[in-house]
Every structure is written in structure tokens, then in C-alpha cells.
Image (spheres, coloured by chain):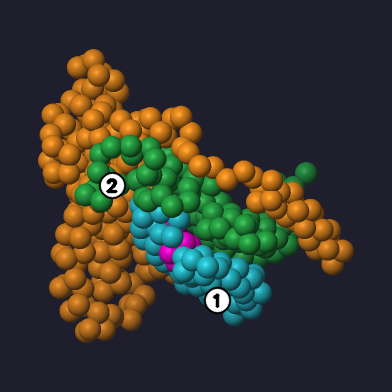
Amino acid sequence: MYKNILILALLVGLGILLSTAITDREENTSLPELPAYYADNTAKEVGAANMVTAVIVTYRGFDTLGEVTILFVSAALIAMFLKTGNRRKNRNPRPSSVILSTAQKLLFPLIILFGAYVFANGHLTPGGGFQGGAIIATAFLLWLMANPEGEMRHGILSSLEAFSGTFYVIIGVVGVILGVGFLNNSILPLGELGRLFSAGAIPVIYSLIGLKVGAELSNILHHLNEVQNEE
Amino acid sequence: MEQYLTLQNIGIATGFALILIGLYGGLTNKNILRIIVSFTIFNSGLNIVIVALAYLKGRVAPIIDDTTGLDNLSQKFVDPVPQALVLTAIVIGLGVTGVMLAYALKMYQNKQTLNINDFKETKW
Amino acid sequence: MDVNIILALFLAVIMIVVAVAALMAKRVRTAVLAAGLVSLVASIMFLLLAAPDVAMTEAAIGSGLTTIIFFYVLNKIRRSDV
């Protein structure tokens, strides 16, 4: 018990230290130099209306490549921890209700379409590859709930993931060959600000990221669902 | 008191409160699943703090449209860089939480217990 | 006082109360749901802080998929306190 009190005292001290972040901080009135540069030059350098997308895909594209790699590694780790060999017993799980399975048939393509809309318009409106990928994964989640015994074709998801990951790196290397830099978006014409086909390669790259994230998250959900059927 | 009551300060204070709550839960609980839940609360708090630090009073989200125009954008927008970092951090947070949960499930299947004190193999 | 500040204070109180409830909860599944609620309210907070991209991500991933993964794992650990 005295251990909890000790921890509580420690956290109160930490809280007092952190509260100086509010009392001693001076209110910022202007952006720092680097974000101010991004804000002033994104429209003519990158051509994307959404500045967060411009930062993620172009200015810090290399970070995003690393992030997608981390997501891939975590999906692989989850698959490794949950792999128990082929000792699958038919437990006959409770079949899903009629309402769920009928609504799933109707909603599945619509949710996929909405996810595709979100990642294809990532350079114009809020949204992008990660949000769109998560929405696509929820469509697969609905499918898994309606068909708990269903055998999802692993090959399609894995090859989609491999294809989009490889193509993502290839687009980056094309930028190096053309001499504009790794993952630079100006390998395609920038176009007019605010159009769907603008901002160079950003819609292509973000769509690939969306497909990859969607396939990875669906894979994680599929592995977790497979474990449910084992005993 | 009144001058501290800004949107930014509320965000920072809430985030710090969530961080402290998550830290307390992570340090005092024995159940592995409760430790992971505390971790997700900690994660949300940290994200709120970073986004709140990027907020500037009276400015709008960094998306160009008809109302913002194209001139003097650095006087109109909030900082986009921390927002991009937090977006990255949320997705990685899901990956980390998933790995922790899968590992916790594996540990439970091996020993049939969730108490962190029962796993003594790696203790010195 | 600005209406945004009142809304932000309201959201802040909800988040802190729900986070404390997550720690106090008797069963883990209640705690998981409370943590998901904290994430959902946090996404509204992100919207107030002029970050719509982060708000979308937090609502879809932090609040949706994380909770679902928790429940998949909880379903495998069938115990009374879970």
C-alpha cells in the first residue's frame, strides 16, 4: 500500500513540474520559421491544398515510409504470436443474425468506396491514406463479423500489401533517377491547385499507402478472428 | 485566472491530466490488460498535448480553400508539422497496442494468469 | 466567454472523469470501453484545436480499431474479472 502512496507522491510532483508549462509559457503569436515556410510555399512547391498531407507525403516522405514499415513489422509480429499451427477445431460458432449478414452485403462495397474516396482526396480535404485504410479495415471487420467461419483469401490481401509497398518505394526511386529527390511528388505535373488530378504524385502515393494500411489492418483483424475459432 | 483560460491551455492541461492518470494506472496495476488500457489513455493524452502546443489563437486548420485564399498563409494557419507527427503517432500506437495484446494473450495461454508478478523468468 | 472554450472545458471534464472511471472499473471490459470513449472525446477536442486530419485518424483508429482488437483478445481470455 505504501508503494501506491509513493507513486502518487511522485506523480503529484511530476504534475507540479508539468503545470509550469501552462503558467510560465508565453503565448505564441506567429509560426516558427520552418512551418511558416511550409505554409507560404506549399501551394506553389507541392500543389496540395491540405498542408498536413503535403508534410506527410512530400516534405517528410521518408518518415512515412518508416512508419509504414513499422506497421508492417507489427502486423508480422502479431501474426507470429498468434500462429498456433494447424490445430483448428470446428467449434461451430454461433451463426450471425440475418440482419447483420444482409446489411453487410449492402454496406461492404459502400464502406470500401468511402475509404477509397477518403484516401484519393487526401490532398484536398481532411483525410488520407491512413484514415482511408482504417475505414477499409472496418469494412473487412463487418465481413468477419457476418462470416465468423469465413475463409478470407489471404493471398489477395498479402499480394495487395506487397504490391503497394513495392510500388511506393519504386515511385520514390523514380524521383531519384529523375534527379528531384527521393519520394518527391514533382515526377508528375503539379496541375491546378484544388483539382483531383493535381499535386503531382501525392494522390498516387497516398492511394498506395491507403491500400497498404487497409490490407495490413485487415490482416491483423483476420489473424485475431482465426484465433477465436481455435480451442 | 481569466488569462489562463484559453483553448490551448485547456488542451495542454487535459493532456497532462490524462498522462498522469495513465501513468498511475500503469504503475499500480498488476493485471497486464489493465496496464495496456492505461497505456492507451497515456497515448491519447500525449497526442492532445502535442496538438494543443501547435494551436495558435484565432487561426484555422492548414487546408487551402476559398475562404483562406493564397496570400499570407503563414499568418492564417496553425502549425501543420506537429499534426503530421501526431497522425503518425496514432497509427504506430495501434501497431504497438496490437503487439502488446497479442503478446499478453500468448503469455496468458502459457501460464493461465494475467498477474504481472507471476512472470518471474526475466526478473533478475 | 467564447463558446469554444465552454465546449472545450466540458470535453476536458468528460475525458478526465471517464479516464478515472477506466482505472476504477471492476472489469477489464468496462475499462476498455472507457478508454475508447476517452479517444472518441479526444477526437472532438482535436477538431476544436484546428486539426481535422488528426481528429479523423483518432476517431477511426484510436477509438474504433483499438477497442475492437481489445475485444478480440478479451474474448479469448474467458475469466470472471475480464
Q: Position of residue B30 (x, y in %)?
A: 70, 64
Q: Position of residue B85 (x, y in %)?
A: 45, 42
- Secondary structure mainly formed by the magenta segment: helix
Say few, some or many: other residues with alpha carbon within 10 Å of mark 1 (under 14 / 14 to 19 / 20 or more): some
Residue C44 is covered by the magenta coloring: yes
Q: Quick one: quadrant of the N terminus of chain A? A: bottom right
> Measuring 17% from the left and 39% from the top, which residue is drawn there?
A193
**Apparent colour of chain B:** green
Identify the amino acid type marked 2.
Thr
Say few, some or many: other residues with alpha carbon within 10 Å of mark 2 (under 14 / 14 to 19 / 20 or more): some
Q: Position of residue C60 (x, y in %)?
A: 36, 61
| Residue at mark 1: chain | C
**Apparent colour of chain A:** orange
The reply, left or right, for residue B103 in relation to residue A149 is: right
> Measuring 13% from the left and 29% from the top, which residue is drawn there?
A189
Q: Position of residue C4 (x, y in %)?
A: 46, 65
> Measuring 19% from the left and 55% from the top, which residue is drawn there?
A117
- Judging depth in this view, the residue of A14 and C76 nearest the camera is A14
- Report which residue position mark 2 lands on: B68
Task: Choose mark 2 or mark 1, whichever is in front.
Answer: 2
Chain shaded cyan: C
Residues rendered magenta in the picture: C40-46
Identify the amino acid type marked 1.
Thr
Gap in angstroms between the C-alphas marked 2 and 1: 44 Å
- Report which residue position mark 1 lands on: C30
Q: Quick one: quadrant of the C terminus of chain A? A: bottom left
- Judging depth in this view, the residue of A82 and A157 nearest the camera is A157
Q: Secondary structure at mark 2?
A: loop
> Measuring 23% from the left and 22% from the top, which residue is drawn there?
A175
Residues beneath discs 2 and 1 located on the same chain? no
